[in-house]
Image (tube, grey):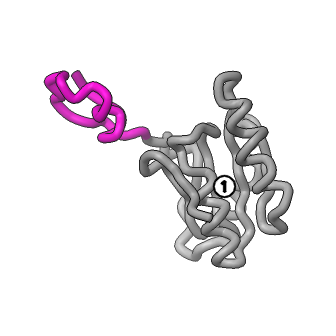
Amino acid sequence: MVSISDSQREPLSWINWQGTVYHGLPRDRFSFHSKPGQYLAFLGRISPEKGVDRAIEIAERAGMPLKIAAKISKVDRPYFEQLIEPLIKRSPYVEFIGRFRKRKKIGFSEMPPRCSFRSTGPSRLES
């Protein structure tokens, strides 16, 4: 069996995992820019394990704009509405763009982010 992340293996530790193949992006989708941009980016889907709350916290602490391009599935809609949407609404740094589509690159390729976030496991903000 092959996983797409090491954390995917945790609930199924009894499986004989052979390796991990991480997600990737097609090279022609984004162009390389040697200088960092002026914003942070979160691309993916909104769910507790993806860490968008951490991305928002980092943007606020750094005082940098954050663009969130993410899908919200039905099962994660309550999580978004109860926890993430209030964080987005209160923050002057966060722009929620919605689902990322190939046809609409929303400026990510023309104006590169300084940093993009990816999931690192379960997310919990401390008060």
The segment highlighted magenta reads 1-23
Is the N terminus in the top left, top right, bottom left or bottom right quadrant? top left
Amino acid beneath label 1: Ser
Q: Is residue 3 magenta?
A: yes
Is the C terminus in the top left, top right, bottom left or bottom right quadrant? bottom right
Q: Nearer the viewer, residue 64 or 125?
A: 125
On the question of residue 122 being in view, the answer is yes
Q: Is residue 4 magenta?
A: yes
Q: Is residue 77 left or right of residue 19?
A: right
- Tell me which corner region of the image, top left, top right, bottom left or bottom right, holds residue 36: bottom right
Q: Residue at x 80, y 51 (%)?
A: 86
Q: Residue at x 30, y 40 (%)?
A: 6
Q: Position of residue 40 (x, y in %)?
A: 65, 64
Q: Considering only vertical position in the picture, is 52 above or below 79?
A: below
Q: Position of residue 63 (x, y in %)?
A: 71, 78
Q: Considering only vertical position in the picture, is 25 above or below 61?
A: above
Q: Residue furthest front?
A: 127
Instruction: Tell me the crowding category of disc 1: few under 14, some 14 to 19, or many 20 or more residues within 10 angstroms, Cα based.
Output: few
- Tell me which corner region of the image, top left, top right, bottom left or bottom right, holds residue 99: top right
Q: Position of residue 39 (x, y in %)?
A: 69, 68
Circle 1: element type: loop
> To which residue does mark 1 refer?
109
Q: Position of residue 34 (x, y in %)?
A: 53, 73
